[in-house]
Image: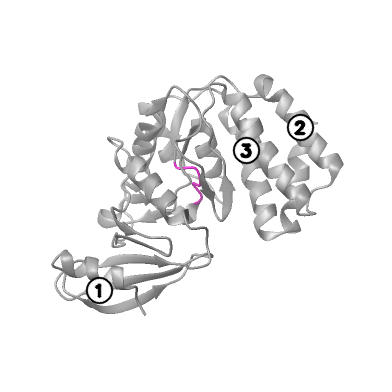
Amino acid sequence: MFPDALAQFIAQQGWGEITSAHPLGGGCINDARVLATSSGPQLFLKQNRAIPADMFAREADGLRELGSTPGAPRVPQVYLHTSSFLLLEYLTPEPRNPRCWEVFGAQMAALHLRTHPQFGFGADNYIGSTPQPNPRHVDGFAFFAEQRLHFQAELARRNGLLSSPDQLRVEKLCQRLPELIPLQPASLLHGDLWSGNIHLGPGGLACLIDPAVYYGWAEADLAMGNLFGSLPAEFYSAYESVRPLTPGYRERFDLYNLYHLLNHLNLFGPGYLPQVQGILSHYI
């Protein structure tokens, strides 16, 4: 049931052997299980033999990048990965701490204070199961236009999900980005900050899982946090006490979320087309 490399690693750590494996729901790509060991900690295992060979390696890279950032939200420690599985620390869920959102806001601000001279990342990775290109770029507008909006729009057109006129509107919007979005540094982003990737872990505090890491506009992370729900007021108060935001940031959320909606269009089909077209119609 489990790869030999997994059992060997657990034995080498002095954790004995796997005594139980409980399936976890919520994911739409991988088989996820919580493993109990005879003399060690609980572990979190993701398995999939039908994904690109580097997908788990890229996820591990992202978790390590987030985890090496002082003051940032907690992420699971990476123990072992191969082309078919990823073994992580299991962050035991606990009831929400009353200060959860306040702490998380300050931690996300600390994450976004980590910057890089260039946009992108050291390697391409994935947003869900879609490739996410991350070539280094000094110009944030060009990076977001070419590697986020244009890439997804072209993929949607090839998939027969986006018409040529709508793709043209995406390209016209890309040309307007410098007038619509303020200059921002390249901050370290989680990259896929919807509520399902904010996990209540030890102490009832928010932890980050399933990243799509790159250096980009911090407002883009916050926008994704409000695409399928909303981050509460205490989150923003704590965030801005550490890293003040440029006025009007909420009005820009749709611009950033167009990337994620195009990706959802590519992943899940035409049900997301009206939201894509609605944003395009607002600006073009």
Find residue 237 and report its horizontal and vertical position in percent.
41, 33
Name the residue carrying label 1.
36
Q: Main secondary structure of the magenta part?
A: loop
Name the residue carrying label 2.
171
- Regarding residue 108, the answer to whether it shows in the image is yes
Residue drawn at x 78%, y 29% as measured from the top left: 172
Q: Quadrant of the N terminus?
A: bottom left
Give the vertical position of 283 relative to 207 (above or below).
above
- Spatial separation of the CA atoms under disc 2 and disc 1: 50 Å
Q: Helix, strand or loop at disc 3?
A: helix
Q: Helix, strand or loop at disc 1?
A: strand
Q: Helix, strand or loop at disc 2?
A: helix
Q: Which is nearer the N-term, disc 1 or disc 3?
A: 1
Q: Which is nearer the N-term, disc 2 or disc 3?
A: 3
Question: Residue 19 got which mark?
Answer: none
Find residue 59 and report its horizontal and vertical position in percent.
42, 51
Name the residue carrying label 3.
148
